Amino acid sequence: MANKIRDVRLMRDERSIGELGAPALVISQFTLYGDARKGRRPTWQAAAPGPVAEPIYDAVCDRMAELGTPVSRGRFGAAMAVELVNDGPITLVLDSPGTSTAQGR
């Protein structure tokens, strides 16, 4: 997953943050796993519990740093106010073997 995040070509001129030497802000967001297909109250049952998810989050951040990507991290499990400027509207779901979040859905 670290390689995929570093190498996905989503920057200007179809370049990656790895090619540009750009930094990454990596924030765990279990709420991205929210499922609101039934009713009006989302469920987060597909999200891994903290003791499972946090080591994965740390490993991805560590691997990105090993690959030479400057990494700033969020604080796992914390309520955070993150301010950023998006350069264009884009939402990607990145997946790799063994990390599927869809769980057959």
Image (spheres, helix red, strand yellow):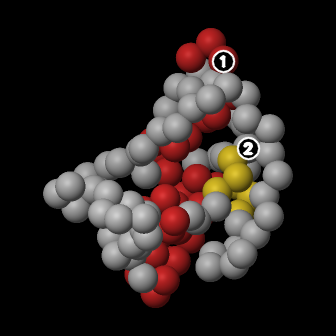
Q: Could you tell me residue 73's position as x and y percent?
A: 71, 63
Query: Residue 9: x percent and y percent?
Result: 53, 26
Identified at 56% across, 64% down, the residue is: 29
Depth check, front residue: 41 or 19:
41
Check disc 1 and report the residue beneath it.
12
User: In the rendered image, which residue does mark 2 sit on?
Assistant: 23
Amino acid type indicated by mark 1: Arg
- Between 33 and 23, the one nearer to me in the picture: 33
Q: Position of residue 46 (x, y in %)?
A: 33, 70
Q: Are marks 1 and 2 in contact (CB under 8 Å)?
A: no
Is label 1 in a helix, a strand or a loop? helix
Q: Disc 2 on helix, strand or loop?
A: loop
Q: Which residue is pictured at 71% across the width and 66% down the height?
A: 74
Q: Is residue 54 above or below residue 95?
A: below
Q: Earlier in the sequence, mark 1 or mark 2?
A: 1
Residue at 20% over, 55% down: 105
38 or 20, which lies in front? 38
Q: Residue furthest bottom?
A: 51
**Amino acid type, label 2:** Pro
Q: Is residue 101 visible?
A: no
| Position above or below: 13 against 33 | above
Residue 18 position, x and y percent, is 61, 35
Number of the front mark, 1 or 2: 1
